Amino acid sequence: MKYSYGIMDDNRIILYTPQLFIKTNDLLVFPSKDFHKWHGDLKEYIDGLYQINSINMEKCKSINMDEFNLASGLLINITEELHHLFDPERTPDFSYQYVSTLDEEYTKRRGNWYTSDMMKCDMRIHLKPAINPWVKEQNMMEIVDHAVRELTMVRRKKQKKLTEY
Amino acid sequence: MLSTSTAMNFDHYSIPPTWEKVKVIMRVSEGVPNGRIAELYNPGLFQKHEEVIVFEREGFKRTYNSIREQIEYINKIAVHLDEGEDWKLLGYWPKILERIHILDINMNLMFKEEPVQCYLDTIYIMQLEVQRIMWQYLQGKYLYNQSF
């Protein structure tokens, strides 16, 4: 790729090798030290990726999920550096990358307190009662009591309405 | 005398004082060459007598986009991998390594002085295609709906 160093002088740049840019009309200019640092950072990340692979080769096993997550984390750093080159005010937004277990939302217990499994356990009767005539009568008396309670409530409501008017 | 000869010289390293990474704000400017000098669109960014590096925009764009494409490819794989599917990595990892290798080559390209062979090849083939189409057009035999 055609590149040249230059020095800034009086709002313009004096190029050290201008003969490379005879045919081009469009240049990109970076400060040299910062650009070398950026380049070095990216190379370090890529070296990290190669290291993950070399560790893998030593073990002679295939790569597992944890190492792959490490590699994808490094890739996130690389993308961040690439964005940073042209947008220095960008703040990295990691909110979609991971969720902290200490986050408030995730410490709250969500969902059903009484699950369907628990209900099945409760409803399942392990010792079935023997159904006598006494048990049948008890059942009927329960229904009658419930009906009496309901009817008295209805009567009271009707009396209230009459007394109001 | 012994102490000075055996002492390790750390002058050529630049170790930052803390472990925090110091974020450098990158300054970029576009420019136009004009003989020995390059005229900038944004000269106020750079300080007086600051050393700069000047790239040809097309070449830089090509390498930058190529790097982005490799990362997108790897990210696509990473997104579709579920938690318990380690066995899939057996097949995916060599492909991912290929892309990482291309990433590395692209990073090295930025400071390479020779032109890239694959770019020259594609430019040459494209020029031949354009010549062929122009010749067909001039003869009146150009097929507008033909797909290449």
Image (cartoon, rainbow, N blue to C red):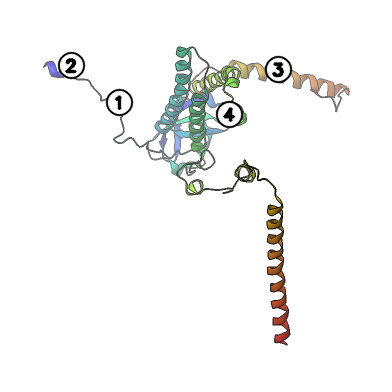
Examine the rendering and report whether any part of residue B36 can be seen.
no
Q: CA distance from mark 4 to mark 3?
A: 35 Å
Q: Are marks 4 and 2 on the same chain?
A: yes
Residue tagged by mark 4?
A: B78
Question: Which of the two marks, 4 or 1, is nearer to us in this view?
Answer: 4
Q: Are marks 2 and 1 on the same chain?
A: yes
Counting residues from the start of the chain, the first of labels 2 and 3 encountered is 2
Residue tagged by mark 1?
A: B13
Residue tagged by mark 3?
A: B125
Q: Element at badge 3? A: helix
Q: Disc 3: which chain?
A: B
Q: Element at badge 1? A: loop
Q: CA distance from mark 2 to mark 1?
A: 17 Å
Residue shown at 39% from the left, 40% from the top: B47
Counting residues from the start of the chain, the first of labels 3 and 1 encountered is 1
- Given the image, on which type of amino acid does mark 3 rest? Ile
Q: CA distance from mark 4 to mark 1?
A: 37 Å
